[in-house]
Amino acid sequence: MAELNQLETRVRRILATALPGTLRVAVAARGEGPGSNFEVTVQAGAADHRFLAGWAGEGWPGDVEAMVHLVPGVEVAVAANLSRGARDWLARRGIGWVDEAGHAEIVRPSGLVISREPGPLTSRPASPSTKWARSTLAAAEAALSGTVPTVENIEKATGLSRNATATALHKLERLGLLQRPQALRGPMSGRRVADTEALLAAYVDAATDQRSKSPKILMHRLWVGDALESLRTEVAPALNATKSKWAATGVAASILLAPYLSDVTTLDIYVDSDLFSDKARLASRLGGRIVERGHVVAIRPLPTPMAATGPIVEGIHVALPVRVYADLLSSGGRAAEAAQHLKEVRGVASGS
């Protein structure tokens, strides 16, 4: 109870700092239900603006996703320092936000509108997760999928060079996501994941940033039945015949791994760089045409060597579950709900 009272005070202070001084803020913790959430009343003259706020911890995408899952109907996320990826994720769901770093974006139907961005001296430095190299992402994927994070194990799992593997693990250790209880040296040195949820949250932020900058080929084609059926009967056989590495991700992959949604509107596919580089060959093989809009297939180059190491389901190569999870979260909406279901059913980041 004491911790909840302290958090209530912290949430009140964060909101009071973000709002103009002429407004009064009342915060009351709700005792029922999971998650830390609060009834907030903002008094502006004779008008009262009410909304439900939820505490999103440090403010990584994984933190806000978990909070939204635990607090149905949440209208404003409150956190220590919301990352850009977390704010984008909330915006896609129409949820406001405010944090101790000075970010605030609250628009209520009652007429309350707050928009703040901290100045250059108080703004959060670029998240270290957004600066991850491809090898760091691959090492994180391996660790989150159950590989013990030694140089030897990660090198074997990812196919990275010894130097790239050591550099990636050092980066994750320096960020506090891996730790080495004993000062050991060598390829069998005893690193371990310091906090699985923290590593997953940082990985999702980095993967989302990488995906937003990735080139893509948009394609239109007619389906045989529906998109998933065409993936099974036409697209997968065509890609398998190339002997290239590829993997389905997104909603189609989530249905194959842990059914939650039932309708696939767009196929989201990764292919290796050789296949991606020949757009005309790729379009011909998949029986589609390249478009700028109105696409039903989105193709991106494989983001890491680990991404294509997921299971094969009904002849379909599925991306690594933790990568599918990150891609679903980056899409927002119902795809983010499918991500939470995937996490629960498949044990994403639990080592399974």
Image: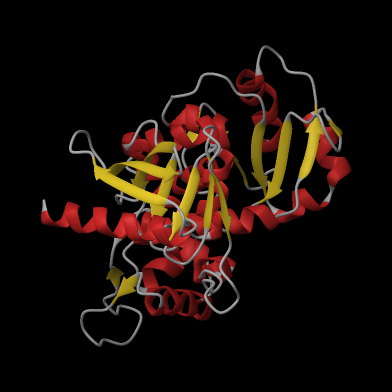
Q: Residue at x 34, y 72 (%)?
A: 150
69 sits to left or right of 117: left
220 sits to left or right of 128: right
Q: Farthest residue toward the front?
A: 46
Q: Residue at x 40, y 58 (%)?
A: 16
Residue nearer the viewer, 279 or 238:
279
Q: Farthest residue toward the top?
A: 225
Q: Residue at x 42, y 79 (%)?
A: 170
Taking the image as drawn, is residue 185 in sight?
yes
How many numbered marks does the figure carry? 0
Taking the image as drawn, is residue 319 in sight?
no
Residue nearer the viewer, 45 or 277:
45
Say above or below: 129 vs 96: below
226 sits to left or right of 155: right
Say above or below: 74 vs 60: above
Residue nearer the viewer, 27 or 94:
27
- Residue 181 appears in which quarter of the rendering? bottom left
Residue 228 percent location from the top left of the image: 60, 22
- Residue 171 appears in which quarter of the rendering? bottom left
Tell me, what colour scheme is on the image?
secondary structure
Residue 147 percent location from the top left of the image: 34, 60
Residue nearer the viewer, 145 or 89:
89
Residue 201 percent location from the top left of the image: 41, 56
Say above or below: 342 vs 190: above
117 sits to left or right of 59: right
